[in-house]
Image (cartoon, helix red, strand yellow):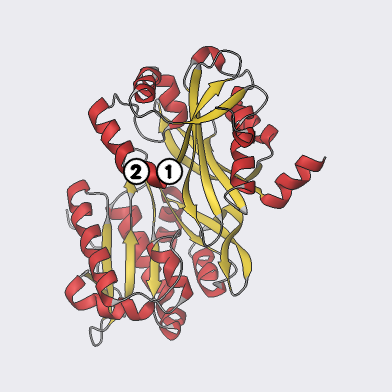
Amino acid sequence: MTFTTQLFQSENLVLQAYDPQKDAAAEAAFSYDPNYANVIDWAIVPHPLTVFEVKKMREDQLKKGSEKDNFFLFGIHSNADGQFLGIITFPEVFWFNRYSFFKVYLGEPIMRQALYAEALNLALVYGLEELDLYSLYTSTGEYEPEVKLALEGAGFQEAVRQRENIFRDGRYWDRVFVELMQSEWKIRHAEVHS
Amino acid sequence: MNNPVLTGQRVRLVALDLEEDLKLFEEWNADSEYQRLADAGAANRYNFKLTKEFFEKEIEDMHAFVIQKLDDDRKIGMIDLGGLNWHVRSAWVGIGIGVREFWGKGYGTDAMKIILRYGFTHLNLNRIQLDVFSFNERGMKSYEKAGFKHEGRLHGNLVKTGKRYDEVFMGILRREWEALQSA
């Protein structure tokens, strides 16, 4: 038997092991984006982070994750020049129930526009094929319309709308959880690749 | 001591006693159904020393209370506000009535009403949310009585006895709670 899926490579992107020494500086630069805060922890106050903070956070997470085997973090890099573009993270896989929250984040708006769907597909293949999870969910909302649209385009459906659970630009926004079942994704995935 | 904010019609909320109350938690957790209603993970027996160490480490960041009956001072459950997001002014609430004979008798609803009052009038929160499992219909009815609205569900997120159940999300906004008080 052979496996035809390349889990860590797509047309324009390659997933690398996150390297706090090399990647933290680039990631800290992303923290000027208020949407970045939701990637690391919904409960933190959005503010620019120092390289030290990002490096320490990622080192701690990688250490704890290796002990519990329920945390996955990848650096998203450009295939062409190796540039660090963002992250894919599954911060806590619930093996007992076989589901996970996950986040795909690309730091530069132009990269988000061009490559979010491709990065998302890498995350879905990893979560639903390699980790073999029953379902995946993530948070989004009307405050990031391009991300919400890309998620819906990949088959995600709105499951939960937590009213007024994001504060951004002087007003409240709803925090929306969208979900995708492995069974539905398999059908879509097979159609796309047939 | 009675604090009017923390006192309801049938129960009051009191601070945890990290010796005596943790022994009660141990008793309640011996009822696996209690754990299955409260926890998304596998029911388990928890080492008392480790539980105590957990609370000693985390208690400063918790708003956890024991639920005590007004008529005889018996402690029957616990309730806590956690995952506080001060930026958004929201929090998660968790509740468990550990003594089975007091299930479905309004004690949990009374405790929930107290903690909503505490959260909105003392912690200045804008919203309070919870998740509950779709098989826990008694819990959902109680939360609806306290004013929570359904905000959706993650389908099949939980496995119990070989079957999948939904994780149901509910929330209440401060203005909705205020409207209930003046109704």
Task: Name which residue lies at 35% across and 48% down.
Answer: A133
On the same chain, marks 2 and 1? The answer is yes
Chain at tag 2: B
Question: Which chain does the numbered disc 1 sit on?
Answer: B
Residue A131 visible to the viewer? yes
Q: Name which residue lies at 24% across and 68% down.
A: A8
Q: Quadrant of the C terminus of chain B?
A: top right
**Crowd class of label 1 (few under 14; some 14 to 19; many from 20; radius 10 Å):** few
> Neighbour class for label 2 at 10 Å: few (<14), some, many (≥20)?
few
Which residue lies under the disc numbered 1?
B62
As drawn, the label of residue A137 is none
Query: Could one spot residue B152 in this view of the protein?
Result: no
Kindly check if marks 2 and 1 are in contact, taking CB atoms under 8 A apart as contact. yes
Residue A62, given in percent of the width and then of the height, sits at 21, 59
Distance of mark 2 from mark 1, alpha carbons?
6 Å
On the picture, is B110 further left or further right than A73?
right
Relative image position of residue B28 (x, y in whole percent): 40, 19
Which residue corresponds to the image point at 45% horizontal and 83% vertical from the top-left? A109
Near-viewer residue (A62 or A139) = A62
Q: Nearer the viewer, residue A187 or B100?
A: B100
User: In the displayed structure, would residue B150 be above or below residue B75?
Assistant: below
Label 1, secondary structure: give it.
Answer: loop
- Percent across and percent down for residue A46 are 45, 70
Q: Which residue is mark 2?
A: B58
Which residue type does callout 2 highlight?
Glu
Q: Does A155 appear above or below A18?
A: above
**Image quadrant in which you'd find residue B148:** top right
Residue projecting furthest to the right: B183
